[in-house]
């Protein structure tokens, strides 16, 4: 796993490349647009898991809270965009989540475990990148990203906790396999900047 010092390093297999950080700081208005979309997607992921596994009451209640928090984050990002005079725009989906989900198993109970672990990895990557960007962004984005980074750290810990409870003997080796794929995706160069993209070519 990554040797970075952030809590997300517990489950990430590689740190974010420095070229991605530099590009994100140079294009932070564009990054905000994708960030807003990511918060909506995070809420929809939590809701989808609730519908997929309604018999797991404890998971459903936790995900209901998480979905509400993600939607509050979306509202915060939209307000930040308005304050910075950044217009909302439609975007084509990036490859990250699509290709990460392609690694999911299709049969249960493996699929449930994989969904929890992939969600944990996405949240952990978000937490890591918030921590990298927050000290370098202008106010008030610096404070917003610092606060969001703490929330995302709680979110990935929640998903990991449910994964460990669901498959005590399997979750860690499966996490390592999925984390290796996630590391490939954030390390491979991409021409279009996204919150979860790889670095620009260089």
Image (cartoon, grey):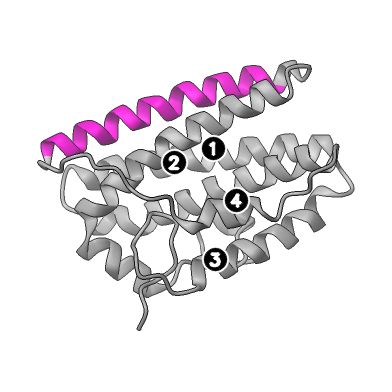
Q: Quadrant of residue 73?
A: top left
As drawn, the residue found furthest toward the right would be 169
Residue 119 got which mark? none
For disc 1, the neighbor class at 10 Å (few under 14, some 14 to 19, many from 20) is: some
C-alpha separation, residue under disc 4 versus residue under disc 2: 15 Å
Residue 150 is tagged as 2
Image location of residue 29, percent across then percent down: 20, 52
- Find numbered disc 4 in the image and state the secondary structure of the residue it sits on: helix
> Which residue position is annotated with label 1?
154
Q: Measure the C-alpha gap from mark 1 to mark 4.
A: 12 Å
Residue 7, can we see it?
A: no
- Helix, strand or loop at mark 2: helix
In the depicted view, which residue is nearer to us: 98 or 137? 98
Task: Say which label, 4 or 2, has the lower sequence index.
Answer: 4
Quadrant hosting residue 202: bottom left
The segment highlighted magenta reads 59-83
């Amino acid at each position: 796993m990554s040797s970075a010092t952030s809590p997300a390093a517990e489950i990430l297999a590689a740190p974010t490349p420095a070229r991605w950080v530099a590009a994100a700081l140079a294009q932070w208005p564009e990054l905000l647009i994708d960030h807003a979309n990511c918060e909506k997607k995070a809420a929809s992921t939590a809701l989808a898991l609730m519908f997929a596994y309604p018999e797991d009451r404890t998971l459903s209640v936790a995900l209901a809270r998480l979905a509400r928090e993600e939607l509050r984050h979306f509202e915060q990002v939209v307000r930040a965009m308005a304050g910075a005079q950044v217009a909302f725009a439609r975007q084509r989906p990036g490859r990250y989540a699509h290709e990460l989900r392609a690694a999911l198993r299709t049969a249960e109970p493996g699929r449930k475990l994989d969904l929890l672990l992939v969600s944990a990895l996405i949240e952990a990557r978000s937490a890591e990148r918030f921590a990298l960007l927050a000290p370098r962004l202008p106010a008030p984005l610096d404070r917003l990203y610092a606060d969001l980074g703490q929330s995302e750290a709680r979110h990935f810990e929640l998903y990991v906790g449910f994964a460990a409870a669901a498959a005590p003997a399997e979750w860690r080796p499966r996490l390592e396999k999925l984390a290796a794929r996630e590391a490939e995706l954030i390390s491979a160069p991409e021409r279009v900047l996204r919150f979860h993209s790889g670095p620009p070519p260089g």
